[in-house]
Amino acid sequence: MPRMAKLSITWLGHSTFVLRTPAGKRVIFDPWVSTNPACPESAKKVGELDLMLVTHGHFDHTADVVSLARATDAQVVAPYELSVFFQNKGLKNVVGMNPGGTLKAHGLSITMVPAMHSSSIEDDGKLIYAGLATGYVVTFEDGLTAYYAGDTSVFSDMKLIGEMYRPSVAFLPIGDLFTMGPEQAAVAADMLGVRQIVPMHYGTFPLLTGTPARLRELVTPNAIDVLELKPGETSE
């Protein structure tokens, strides 16, 4: 059996990440690229994709779902109502889920979990209900498990997510106002029992005031690493 590579994480700004899995699959979370002010021009050509995981309907998480899916034929996974919206836009390779469900796809185990947030999508100037806001727990080919929280506040079931799935890495929003800030994210990390946090949903707009530096002050010293990436930067 060929030796697997390490998980590669590229941040495209805000909450958009491209992950290259240990077996070489390319997965994008909450794609907002073309009009994302935090995404550098050099990173806006995403390239090939195998899988797209979408947490909820807000524009800053869905703006490029349809265009990237058409360009790459990536499989799109989304909350059920949102998946129907994407199918009505002509996408064929779409799977709708609800929290609690697990999907096996591209060698990965993908479990949809709850998030505490609203969800709607704008179409022809009207807001359309887009189902529940969600997060994902993904177990990769080498057994590493990551939790992508989506937009959320801290909530007590994060402790249950930690106990059931044992994630090593958590992608957590820290910007405040629309999601939790660093103070809540630090509590979330403790409940999840993760060794590393990848902060997201901060710095894109002036209203998003939370910072990785503040989060680093609050997490358990020497137990939790805060992986602070610059938009366009890749880490393994």
Image (spheres, helix red, strand yellow):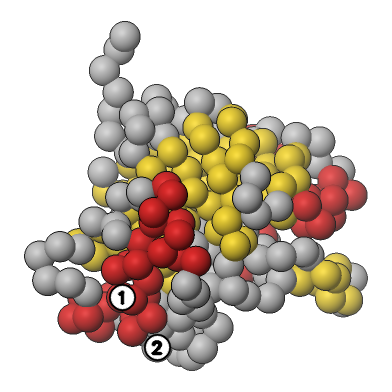
Residue at x-position 45% and y-position 59%: 160
- 119 displayed left or right of 210: right
Q: Is residue 123 above or below residue 26?
A: below
**Which circle marks residue 209 in the picture?**
2
Mark 2 or mark 1: whose residue is earlier in sequence: 1
Q: Amino acid at mark 2?
A: Thr
Residue situated in front as seen by the camera: 94 or 96: 96
- 168 displayed left or right of 180: left
Q: Is residue 234 above or below residue 126?
A: above
Residue at x-position 43% and y-position 38%: 139
Q: Is residue 93 visible?
A: yes
In this figure, what is the number of numbered marks? Answer: 2
Q: Residue furthest left?
A: 222
Residue at x-position 18% and y-position 81%: 217
Q: Amino acid at mark 1?
A: Ala
**Which circle marks residue 83 in the picture?**
none
Pick the quarter of the image with the C terminus: top left
Q: Nearer the viewer, mark 2 or mark 1?
A: 1
Dot 1 lies on which element?
helix
Residue to which mark 1 is pinned: 186
Dot 2 lies on which element?
loop
Residue at x-position 52% and y-position 35%: 109
Q: Is residue 146 visible?
A: no
Q: Position of residue 89 (x, y in %)?
A: 86, 50
- 116 displayed left or right of 146: right
